[in-house]
Amino acid sequence: MDVAGSSESHSAPLGPLTAGPNTTPSAAVEADPLARARQTREAEAQALRAEQSEIRQLAKRDREVRAHELAHAAVGGPYASNPVYQYTQGPNGVRYATSGHVKVDVSPIPGDPAATLEKMQTVARAALAPAQPSAADRAIAAQANQQATQARAELAALQAESRAQALEEGAQRSGEGRGDHLSTGARRPPVGSVSGGVIDLLV
């Protein structure tokens, strides 16, 4: 018990858990084995929580990356490569995919605009297949759509040419049929050049 006015009330040591006027908390902890052990356990628990949080984040990223790249590959079919991943090793020693890519073929099919159009439509769908396409994915889709537009134009031109040729051939056959009932002098050959009985239509 402290006595008022006594000069000896604080002269005796009060024990390691009591910090005097010139004693810091860290010094008190260092002087107490139990406090040191408690501090060590708290630091270890904090480090474990941080490690578990990092592992959860890496595992989540791994799932996202794999789903993203597999979506490209699945929709791209023969025009897409297998996914390639880059890994980060977690504190638990496990390697997690943290980035990746799939190569896609955006070259046109020479001489076949119909096949090119079908291919580019597939490539564009593959580029935008993931739930959250990246900027690079959107750029590839735009490139494929541009190739598809060009293929449509080429296909339309070929189809128009084919229709015109069919109409011309139909007119030729119709003219030949009517000629059976006309005199030789009244027959008029269809437009074109005649050589050895073979008609070369001019397109």
Image (tube, rainbow, N blue to C red):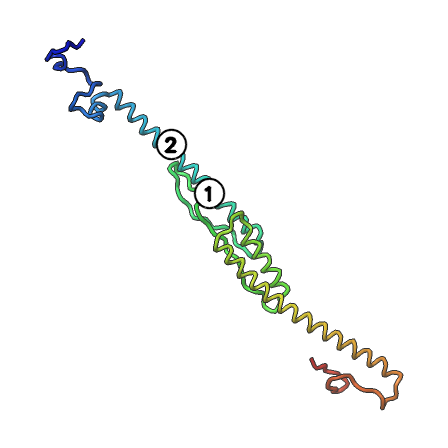
Q: Are marks 2 and 1 in contact (CB under 8 Å)?
A: no
Which image quarter holds the N terminus? top left
Depth check: give the residue in front, 96 or 68: 68
Report, in whole angstroms, how far the alpha carbon at label 2 lies from the one at label 1.
Answer: 20 Å
Inspect the image, locate mark 2, and give the three-letter code of the amino acid beneath it. Arg
Inspect the image, locate mark 1, and give the three-letter code of the amino acid beneath it. Asp
Depth check: give the residue in front, 113 or 195: 113
In this rendering, position of residue 203 left or right of residue 69: right
Q: Which residue is mark 1?
A: 62
In this rendering, position of residue 15 left or right of residue 140: left
Q: Which residue is at 72% across, 72% downward?
A: 163
* Residue 56 screen position, x and y as percent: 43, 37
Residue lying furthest bottom in this view? 185
Which image quarter holds the C terminus? bottom right
* Residue 28 screen position, x and y as percent: 21, 23
**Nearer to us: label 2 or label 1:** 2
Q: Secondary structure at mark 1?
A: helix
Q: Which residue is mark 2?
A: 49
Q: Which residue is at 57% across, 65% downward?
A: 108
Crowdedness near tag 2: few (<14), some (14–19) or many (≥20) residues, C-alpha within 10 Å: few
Q: Is residue 67 above or below residue 29?
A: below
Q: Which residue is at 64% across, 64% downward?
A: 114
Crowdedness near tag 1: few (<14), some (14–19) or many (≥20) residues, C-alpha within 10 Å: many
Q: Secondary structure at mark 2?
A: helix
